[in-house]
Image (cartoon, grey):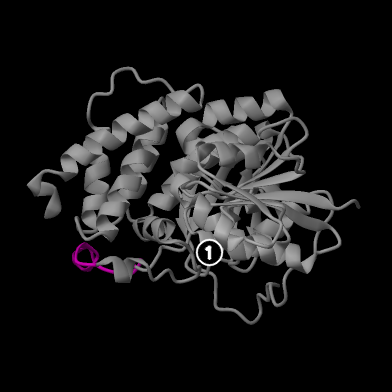
Amino acid sequence: MPLRTITLLGATGSVGRSVRDVVAENPQRLAIGTVVGGRDAEALARVAVETGARFAALADATAGDALKRALAGSGIESGAGRSAVLEAVARPADIVVSAISGAAGLEATFAALLPGRTIALANKESLVCAGEAVMARAAAAGARMLPLDSEHNALFQVLGHEPLDSIRSMTLTASGGPFRTWSAEAIANAGPEQALRHPNYAMGAKITVDSASLMNKGLEVIEARFLFGLEPAQLDVLVHPQQVVHGLVTFRDGSVSAGMAVPDMRVAAAHCLGIDGRLDAPPARFLDLASGEPLTFERPDLQRFPALGLALAALAEGGAKPAILNAVNEMAVAAFLAGRIRFPGIAALVEAVCAQDFGAARAPQDVAEALAVDHDARQRAALLLSRAPFAAT
């Protein structure tokens, strides 16, 4: 099989690390040519040198000089700002890994959808904010969209070549996060330190807080609706603390198939990068069911974790509501991490803004519309955050 070149968007994050591990395990089949990061020039420079990339770009336009200094003598080209990120995306590559966190990854993901490209998608917000537009663009361009999130990747593998009308429902699993067994009162008094203690994964702060609130699972359900073309009523969530079963597909004949693996993003990354021929897994990444604890499942408690219910309601309402929900949640999580609101304030802020009148806001048809919705929702969230009652929420 010929060497595949990779553009890695979000190269310094947790998904980026997983992808780099898989590439290092399969040097005869994979090579990273371009890396993109957020604002940490030193970290991106280290990744660029270690992977042998030819081009490195930072989203932060003010960090360009720092990146050039960090790469001095390496021969690696670099740039910073929006134009540099889009230049990175336009460079030749067989696979583009889209792992920039949050709505910030939407424009780069959309630009990456070129003929013949394979997109390994770990930026769920691209589909949450503009699912219809992204999937339509992918189909029109002939780009192949592969899910790199563990849950969606498991469902994708389970489906194989089964037709859409053979599916009765899909179930995504959630670990339950650090507060799974906590009382509502204890959750209300939890601070960032407690929320950032995910039981199974080492991830960035924002997604870890989303996992604690179960908002992450709600965003993943919205992503699955567009990725697999199902109706909202066909999607379900189960809490599964062991995180061995990542997804379940129930077929119309009553049979159920499960996607199982150790809880490690490198498994999904290996599948996406080796889509036309399985790759070797990093060491010790194989599942041993006999040596693990019993597998348990439970329904999510929407009273203690209202964020999941808000996400499901946004999906059911449709239009621009998922994009609004995502924008406000990003604002709310940032406020919580900064100590401006308490943990219940995250869901409270999302609920308050989503309840406002946005008119007949249709589902965004392109990046510009999605970003306009995002901007409007963030302004409304900022206004509420500036008012004293929210600080105590």
Residue 70 occupies which quadrant of the picture? bottom right
Indicate whether 246 appears above or below 113: below
Residue at horizontal 51%, vertical 38%? 82
Q: Give x and y (percent) for residue 361.
A: 36, 20
The magenta region covers: 179-190
Q: Amino acid at mark 1?
A: Glu
Residue 327: % across, % down: 36, 39
Judged from this view, the residue extending furthest toward the right is 1
Residue 212 image-quadrant placement? bottom left
Q: Point out residue 192 in the picture as x, y percentages from the top left corner.
A: 29, 66
In this picture, residue 7 sits left or right of residue 323: right
Residue 293, image x, y percentages: 55, 78
Q: Residue at x 55, y 56 (%)?
A: 67
Of residues 381 and 176, which is closer to you in this image? 381
Q: Nearer the viewer, residue 165 or 347?
A: 347
For label 1, the residue is 42
Res 317 seen here: no
Q: Is residue 188 magenta?
A: yes
Residue drawn at the location 25% of the way across and 40% of the way down: 351
Numbered disc 1: secondary structure: helix
Relative placement, left or right, of 143 versus 250 is right
Residue at the extreme top of the image, as rendered: 360
